[in-house]
Image (tube, rainbow, N blue to C red):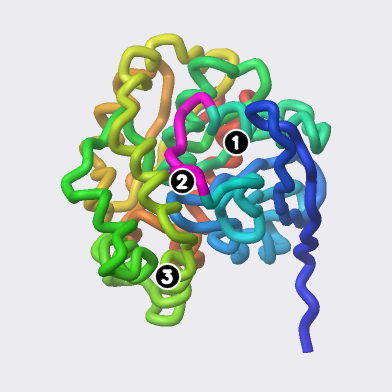
């Protein structure tokens, strides 16, 4: 019998003038690292790292479910609303969680849409953070698919989402973790993946903001999987080149959901990224 070190609680914050009950999990002690999940998923993507004593010995990992995701319920009256995530609402949510938990300049680690918003925050709210790990992140990726397929009466949105992302998981991913990753997408609420993808594929505002990022004050490190078809290594490299002082690592044998699909393969890249968030170590590298 095993009881994991991860603990889960709820935090109520105000977002858009409305109270939101946010579910979050944490493990470890030391420097806080706020971890953001991908579109259509939840904090379970981070469970392997949060159970890694070597990582949590000196880092307090915190992951939360965005509203509409996982254990964070939609707002009251959601049945009459269309969920479409925006950059502004996303930023407000992340900052509300930071303030609500009393975090002092945490490292922000986000994947996919979480990586995109990490770069937005690096440009707009860098003083709130001590560093940014942008995973599978690029300046802009227009949709190469019809996002409306993920919310139709004649198709199961969760299974459609899992089918889409399955092509973005590395062939080297362990079979069990591949299916665990896909299961999260199968469980996504109606219209949630579509609403996340609306943000991810339609908001190109980051392109003009990359030059605002000052890596001399807050380091930025990009990680990208060699088998990522959505945010390719070329996309990540283009983005890193537009941020003076940003660093980039291409992760061999990994895809778009590295912390979930292949945690063992992702671990060394993440540990190295955490080291880069220390200005002294980064300068010596």
Q: Is 243 situated above or below 55?
A: above
Rendering coords of residue 31 (x, y %): 75, 39
Crowd band around label 3 with a 10 angstrom C-alpha radius: few (<14), some (14–19), many (20+): some
Crowd band around label 2 with a 10 angstrom C-alpha radius: few (<14), some (14–19), many (20+): many
Residue at 79% over, 42% down = 12
Determine which residue is flagged by label 2. Answer: 111
Of residues 256 and 277, the one nearer the viewer is 256
* Mark 3 vs 1: CB contact within 8 A: no
* Mark 2 vs 3: CB contact within 8 A: no
Q: Distance between the Cα atoms at labels 3 and 1?
A: 27 Å
Determine which residue is flagged by label 3. Answer: 186
Determine which residue is flagged by label 1. Answer: 108
Q: Is residue 106 left or right of residue 28?
A: left
Q: Earlier in the sequence, mark 2 or mark 3?
A: 2
Of residues 86 and 136, the one nearer the viewer is 86
Numbered circle sitting on residue 156: none
Q: Secondary structure at mark 3?
A: helix
């Amino acid at each position: 019998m095993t009881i994991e070190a991860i603990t889960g609680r709820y935090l109520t914050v105000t977002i858009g003038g409305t109270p939101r009950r946010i579910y979050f999990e944490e493990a470890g002690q030391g420097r806080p690292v706020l971890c953001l999940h991908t579109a259509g998923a939840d904090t379970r993507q981070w469970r392997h790292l949060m159970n890694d004593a070597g990582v949590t010995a000196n880092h307090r990992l915190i992951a939360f479910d965005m509203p509409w995701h996982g254990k964070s319920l939609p707002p009251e009256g959601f049945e009459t609303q269309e969920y479409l995530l925006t950059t502004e609402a996303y930023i407000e949510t992340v900052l509300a969680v930071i303030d609500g938990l009393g975090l002092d300049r945490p490292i922000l680690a986000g994947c996919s849409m979480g990586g995109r918003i990490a770069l937005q925050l690096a440009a707009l709210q860098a003083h709130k953070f001590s560093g940014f790990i942008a995973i599978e992140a690029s300046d802009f990726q227009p949709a190469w698919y019809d996002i409306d397929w993920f919310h139709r009466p004649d198709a199961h949105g969760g299974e459609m989402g899992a089918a889409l992302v399955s092509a973005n998981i590395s062939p080297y991913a362990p079979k069990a973790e591949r299916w665990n990753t896909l299961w999260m997408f199968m469980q996504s609420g109606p219209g949630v993946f579509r609403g996340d993808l609306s943000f991810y594929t339609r908001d190109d505002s980051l392109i003009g903001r990359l030059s605002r990022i000052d890596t001399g004050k807050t380091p930025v490190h990009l990680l990208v999987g060699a088998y990522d078809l959505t945010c390719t290594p070329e996309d990540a490299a283009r983005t890193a080149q537009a941020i003076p002082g940003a660093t980039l690592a291409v992760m061999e044998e990994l895809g778009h959901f590295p912390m979930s699909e292949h945690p063992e393969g992702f671990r060394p890249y993440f540990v190295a990224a955490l080291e880069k968030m220390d200005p002294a170590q980064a300068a010596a590298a």
